[in-house]
Image (cartoon, grey):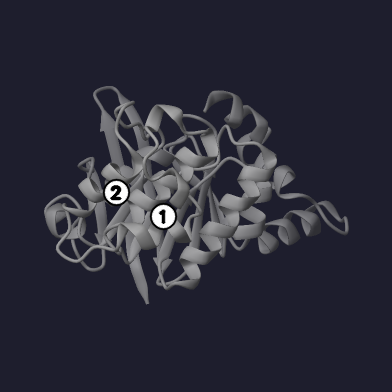
Amino acid sequence: MAVIEVEGLHKRYRDTVAVRDIGFSVAEGEIFGIAGLNGAGKTTTVECIEGLRRPSGGRVRVLGLDPWRDRARLRQVVGSQLQDSMLPDKLRVGEALRLFRSFYRDGADPETLLGELGIETKRHTAFADLSGGQRQRLSIALALIGKPRIVVLDELTTGLDPVARRRTWELIEKIRAGGVTVVLVTHFMDEADRLCDRLAIFHQGSVAALDHPAALRARLAADRGVQDVSLDEVFLAHTGAHPELAEEDA
């Protein structure tokens, strides 16, 4: 069952076309990855899915609803972790969770989330005093506080050290195991290879490739007549640039 359907999505900002004729669907319970260079249209697309931006054309449906027209209803069932999630420096972790919990009719228990995400000892810590990994865990908690059916994670592990990244991957897998559909925007191909059931590679506002990461690798390997290729090579083949360039732009 598709919980997200995108057909012919088009978004223009004055003379700039950010996305053109994008189409894909996301099945219930999968981790759907979106990758691409900076400016490829990734964030614009997920913001249209979340109801934060109105499409210039095309059709978007989330759980059968129009994200722009029905955004008040969808906010009760779609959780979002935005690319630049910031909170007031003095706001404490527990206070942030209780505040966000008040926005939902049927939210999760803040203390339970703190424990599940391993930041229960930080409940009285101000946002400014959290490490990068702790901020990311808090951002996940805030995205999950409404007990969403779908959660959008936009470049969640950017700036984290390798240990913190892998711990965050485990959290994402745990979220999916709990029945939540995950849309994951990433520029780390090892992250996509491990986590994503399917991966869409965006290039210049369009979907350049879409399949399971292993299938994308196998197709390119067959085209080149070799045994195997990396997902980095797949990204390079479809965008003309190494994914490290996306990390530099992020």
Using the image, tell me which numbered label, if any, was put on residue 114. 1
Categorize mark 1 by other alpha carbons within 10 Å: few (<14), some (14-19), many (20+): many
Left/right of residue 109 with respect to residue 127 in the rendered view: left
Question: What percent of the width, then of the height, locates residue 206?
Answer: 45, 43
Which mark, residue 100?
none
| 86 relative to 120, above or below | above
Instruction: Identify the residue shown where x is 82% and y is 51%.
Output: 224
**Secondary structure of residue under mark 2:** helix
Tag 1 or tag 2, which sits nearer the N-term?
2
Question: Looking at this view, is 207 or 194 the one in front?
Answer: 194
Q: Residue at x 71, y 43 (%)?
A: 232
- Image location (x, y in percent) of residue 115: 45, 59
Q: CA distance from mark 2 to mark 1?
A: 9 Å
Quadrant of residue 161 in the image? Answer: top right
- Relative depth, front residue between 190 and 111: 111
Q: Which percent across, then down, holds residue 152?
A: 39, 52
Q: At 47% across and 61% down in the image, what residue appears?
A: 116
CB under 8 Å between discs 2 and 1? yes
Q: Is residue 155 visible?
A: no
Image position of 149 with respect to 54: above or below: below
**Residue 82 percent across, percent down from the top left:** 37, 40
Amino acid type at image mark 2: Leu
Left or right: 61, with 128 as reference point: left
Q: Quadrant of residue 61?
A: bottom left
Tell me which amino acid carries mark 1.
Leu
Residue beneath the point at 50% across and 30% down: 38
In-front residue for pair 227/26: 26
Dot 1 lies on which element? helix
* Numbered tag placed on residue 97 in the rendering: 2
Residue 169 in the figure: left or right of residue 78: right
